[in-house]
Image: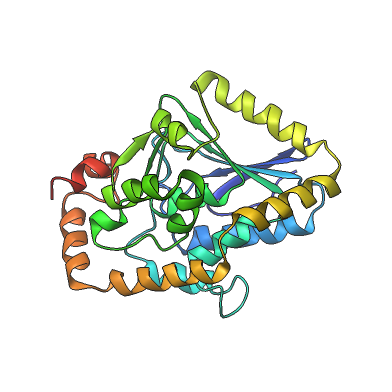
Amino acid sequence: MSWNYSTMRTELRNGVLWATIDNPPINLIDERFVADLIALLDDTEADGNVRVVVFRSADPDFFIPHVDLKRIAEYTATAATSGGPDDNSLGTLFRRLSEARPVTIAVLEGRARGAGAELLYACDMRFASAERAVIGQPEVGTGVFPGAGAVQHLVRLVGRGQAMQVILGSEDLDAREAERIGLVNKVLPDEELTSYVERLAERVAGFPEAAVRLAKRRINAAGLPPKEDVQVDAAQFQILARDPASTARLNALMQRGLQERSPTELEYGTVLGEL
């Protein structure tokens, strides 16, 4: 069984929905991806056969590098359709992902930066490739601010000091460093990663649903930030995105190949320190 989305391919096996992100050229978050994520959340909420959702990428270089910086107005407008006037940002949409009925797992086999990393944090668990996983929050180095949950999630996942370093430093973290500070549950070699996640996902999918749902709900109650704080962060991102200093810095990055399969996009964290 599968559902059809324009930016994700899905397959349901043994209670686990494998959702493979496939949004060429490099899996940027745009209005089509936002619409598909909303649809997937709606579909899996309604279908009790889906007990676990596993997100992974079809692109070996990128999980989700960040939002499409040329289409902020478009994806924001699409996000506003998710659940009412308060759900007008990626942060509140990702909060819905955290609260989804199925358990959610992210498999990181490429680069996840900005809102791509924030989608990772919103999932219930994260597992990373030892060879290829990269996580980064480049917003401050670009002149803006993490607006889709990074501030709230990172403080809770890794502590205040590490959150300061990740966000203010705007550097890329490899898989081992991400594991060391607690950003991912576990790092595994490529040849072991999928089978490990598959075993865990199917194990959870086979447990009594009422117990899994209650455990997830109570863990979320203890560990998720207030929704209002996520909305404040989203508003601050929108303000800084219009600031002339951030616009100038973003234009310089675009001229160097940002949003293309270029050295600038592949080594974003390094490039930010060279501007």
Quarter of the rendering containing residue 59 = top left
Quarter of the rendering containing residue 232 = bottom left
Which image quadrant: the N terminus? top right
Q: Residue at x 41, y 28 (%)?
A: 176
Relative to residue 53, is residue 119 drawn left or right? left
Q: Residue at x 38, y 68 (%)?
A: 72
Q: What count of labels does the image hold?
A: 0
Q: Can residue 115 be seen in the rendering of this structure?
A: yes
Nearer the observer, 260 or 46: 46
x%, y% of residue 35? Answer: 56, 63
x%, y% of residue 236? Answer: 37, 71
Quarter of the rendering containing residue 234 = bottom left
Q: Height in image: 218 above or below 55?
A: below
Relative to residue 68, is residue 242 drawn left or right? left
Q: Height in image: 51 above or below 38?
A: above
Residue situated furthest left in the rendering: 275
Residue situated furthest bottom in the rendering: 85
Q: Residue at x 46, y 44 (%)?
A: 158
